[in-house]
Amino acid sequence: MRRLMGLLAVFCAALLGLQVLSAPSAGAAEVSQDAEAIAKSAGQKWALKSLANRQYVSVALTQTDEQLQWWMRARAASVGSWERFTLHTNHKAKTIGLRSEVTGFLASAEFHDGGDRQGMLRARGVRLGQWQQFTPQYLAEAPPEGSPGGSVVVALTASEKAQDDPNGTPAEKERKYVSAEVGEGGDGLLRARSASLGSWEKFVLEPVAAAGTGPLPEPAGQTASTLDVMSWNVCANNNDDCGWSDDRAGYAELTEEIRTRLRNPDVIFFQEFCEKHAKRVEWLLEKETPIDWDVRFAPLHHATSGGPLVQKQCAMGPKPDSADRGAFGVAVAVPDENTWYQRHDLTSPAADQHEQRSALCAALPSRAVMVCNAHFTAGGKDFGDPNGSIRTTQAKELRDIARNYERQGYRVIFGGDFNSVPPDFKTEKDGPTTILTDTYAAYRECDEGSIKGSPRDGEVTKPLGNREIKIDYIFAPDAAEFTSCTVTRDTGKSDHYPLYGTVTLPAA
C-alpha cells in the first residue's frame, strides 16, 4: 500500500538495515521495524502449547520491567497474535528459532540473567544467534485429541555457549530443556533450565491459519487484458558471485538494483529473495510507479525426520550491522487489489539436506488473473536432482496448480527460475531438455517461436562463464499473445539477466 509521508522516515531508516538493539524499549505496537515486513509472508504460523497445563505460550506485551519485557509464558486459553510464531532455521532444521508475530523478534533464552531469571525466554532476539536457536526433539507420542492436523509433540533444548560443530549439528553437552514452570506458584514461565525431559518440558506445535488463506475471491469476467510481466532471480542471499556487499544484498543495494530495471511492470516475479526485503520493495515500487502495490513472500524450507517444515533463513548481513533479513524464498509483486495469496509446496529432494521449494500465487480478481512464481530445484547431484526427475515433477505440479485456478475462472500467468533449459536448446552438459516439454505443449512461453527452427527456445538468461543458457520463464495461456519478450543482458549484482514479457489475454 502507498505510504503516508510520515512513514518515509521509517523507509529511509529501513534502507540502512535493521536497528540492532540488545533490549528494545519501544511501545508494544512499535516493537519491531519489521512488524509490517514479516506480515507480507505466506509462511506457516504456529502456536506452542504446554502439555503440562494445556495452555498456549503467549508473549507478554504489558510488562514494564525491562528485564521481563516480552517474556514468554504458557498462560493463554486460545490463539491470537500474542501466541503466533513462525519457525526459522540456518542449520537445515537441526535447530529452529521461534519468531513472534506480535514483536517481530525471535525467542531468546536469556542466559546472562541470574537467579530465577536465568534462561528465561523472551521474544526479543534481533537475529538468529546462539541464544535464539533451539534444538528440537520430536517425540513419538500423539498430540492431544482435538489438535489440528500437522501438530507434533516437541521438546526444545538451548545452550548458553556456542557449542555447535562446524557441520551444523548442535552438540548435546550442557544443553538445557525449555520448561514451562507450572508448579505451585508458577505462572507458566518458559525457561531453559532442566537437565532432563519431563512433563514440563513437552509442548505441542500446532499449525494455525494465517492471513490470505480464506476463500478464493470470485474472478470478474474474462475481458481482454494486457500485462507487463518481469521475472528476475536477484541472487540476494549469499552467493559470492553476485557482487553484493559482504556477498549479501542489503535493503538499499537491492532496491536500487531493482529500480534501475523497472519497465512500468504490472507483475514481477522475484527468486532468491529475502523475506524482509518485501516491504522495502513494495515501498520502492510505490515511489517509482503510479500505482499502489502488494509484495508477497513465500519461504523455502528444511525439515528433519518427524518434524514440520521450517523456513530457511537468509544469511545474516550485510556488515557492519549483520541485520536479520528473514527467511529465504520467492516473492510476487502485484497491484494492491490483491488480498488473496497462497504458497504451494513442491516435491523436492531430501528435506534434511536440500531446500524444499515452493510456488507462490496471488490473485487479481478484477482481471480474472492469477499469477504464480516458482524457483525449481537446481540440477546436479549436489542439489539432489542429477537426472531431472525432481524438476520434471515440479513442472507437472506447477501445471496442475495452474489448471486448478483455471477451473475456478482465472487465467494463469506463471514463471520464474526453473533451473531447466527449454526443449529445443542445444546442449551437451545442461540437460535434460525434456523437463518443460509438457509445459510448452500446454502453455505459451514468452520467447516461444522467436528462434527459427527452434521454437521452444529463447534468449539466454543465465551466464555461466564460458556459456549462457535460458532457465528463466514467463508462461501464459496458449490462447494468449506475447507482443514482446526481451532480456536485459546485464546481471547487475545478480547472476541472472532480468526477463520481460508483455502478454495480451483475449476475452473469453
Image: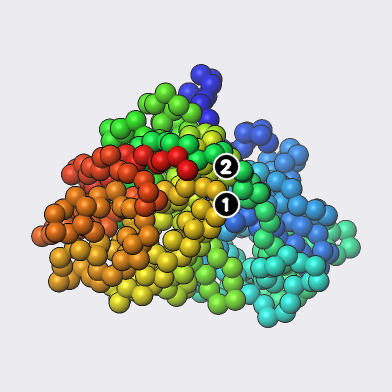
Up the image or down, 17 lies above or below 213; here it is: above
Identify the element where label 2 is drawn: loop
Q: Which residue is drawn at 66% across and 44% down?
A: 102
The mark that comes first in sequence, 2 or 1, is: 2
Observer able to see residue 14: no
Q: Looking at this rendering, what residue extends furthest in the top direction?
A: 5
Extreme-bottom residue of the structure: 140
Furthest toward the left, the residue is 466
The amino acid on which the numbered mark 1 sits, given as a three-letter code, is Gln
Residue 408's disc is: 1
Q: Residues within 10 Å of mark 1 (few under 14, many from 20)?
A: few
Q: Which of 37 and 286 is in front in this view?
A: 286
The residue under label 2 is 219
SS for tag 1?
Answer: loop
Q: Where is residue 46 in the image (x, y as percent from the top left)?
A: 66, 58
Residue found 57% across the figure and 58% down from its top: 87
Q: Which amino acid does label 2 sit on?
A: Pro
Quadrant of the image occupied by residue 355: bottom left
Q: In this view, does 461 lie above or below 508?
A: below
The residue positioned 32% from the left and 44% from the top of the image is 481
